[in-house]
Image: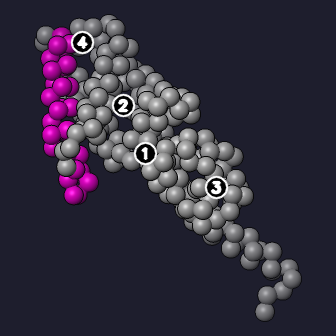
Amino acid sequence: MTTAREAPVAHREKKLRQGPVTREQILDASLRLFSEKGFARTSVRDIAQAAGITDAAIYYHFASKRDLFEALLDERGFTAALESLERAEITAGPTEAIPAMALRALNFIYQNLDLMKVLMVEAMADDPVATEEYQILVERWKKAEARILRFYVDQGLLRTEDVDELATQLVITILGALADFMMSSAAAPADGAVPPALNRHVETAMQHIVQGITAPG
């Protein structure tokens, strides 16, 4: 028999077990609705109804719709991926490392294509939240790449000193290739892998860039 002293403990344990499930339900419902209706046109009430919970339950986990959007980026690993790139140890030369970084980034984004599509489409539609979140993400990405490029310049391995502009070109090349794929009628592989044509396009572009900036040995 559960005593009066034990009851609050059991209640807390039940709440803790339900909490993560509810949070996951909210995030899943949010991404689905953001993809279907857009960020601005999706209300907290829409999300609550789709998740089968109350508005209050959403605000228990997230302070605002923007907080929810930021949580999606964190949960999908965008923040962790950027932090990893910002701390990455440089162990290979630019000819190998630059294309490899690009292909890793492409693979990560493609595995999160549903969220990236929402971010890009809503930013192009001038949604203020999506625009700011997109700019924050891309700027961190550029700065992380610029850190690595600056190392190669200091070692005399690259023929450019404008590493910020070069980092921008590398990032835009990937995003441009991805946007072109999203607007095409090309079929995506059933296994969820990056389409070979998209992978080849980015890899070839990176090789051409590297050939133009690599200092002669």
Camera-side mark, 1 or 2: 1
Kindly identify the amino acid type of the residue bearing the numbered disc 3.
Arg
Against 168, residue 71 (above or below) is below
Q: Which of marks 2 and 4 is nearer the N terminus?
A: 2
Q: Earlier in the sequence, mark 1 or mark 2?
A: 2
Quadrant in the picture for residue 1 = bottom right
Residue carrying label 4 = 158
Kindly identify the amino acid type of the residue bearing the numbered disc 1.
Leu
Residue carrying label 1 = 115
**Numbered label attached to residue 89:** 2
Q: Give the range drawn in magenta.
A: 188-215
The colour style of the image is: one colour
Secondary structure type for disc 2: loop
Q: Distance between the residues labelled 1 and 2?
A: 28 Å
Instruction: Decide if residue 183 is on the left or right side of residue 41.
Output: left
Category of crowding for the residue at label 3, using alpha-carbon neighbours closer than 10 angstroms: few (below 14), some (14–19), many (at least 20)? some
Of residues 180 and 102, the one drawn nearer to the viewer in this rendering: 180
For the residues labelled 4 and 1, say whether their Cβ atoms are less than 8 Å apart: no
Count of numbered badges drawn on the protein: 4
- Whole-percent x, y for residue 136 in the image: 51, 28
Majority SS type along the magenta span: helix
Secondary structure type for disc 1: helix
The residue positioned 44% from the left and 48% from the top of the image is 35
Residue carrying label 3 = 45
For the residues labelled 1 and 3, say whether their Cβ atoms are less than 8 Å apart: no
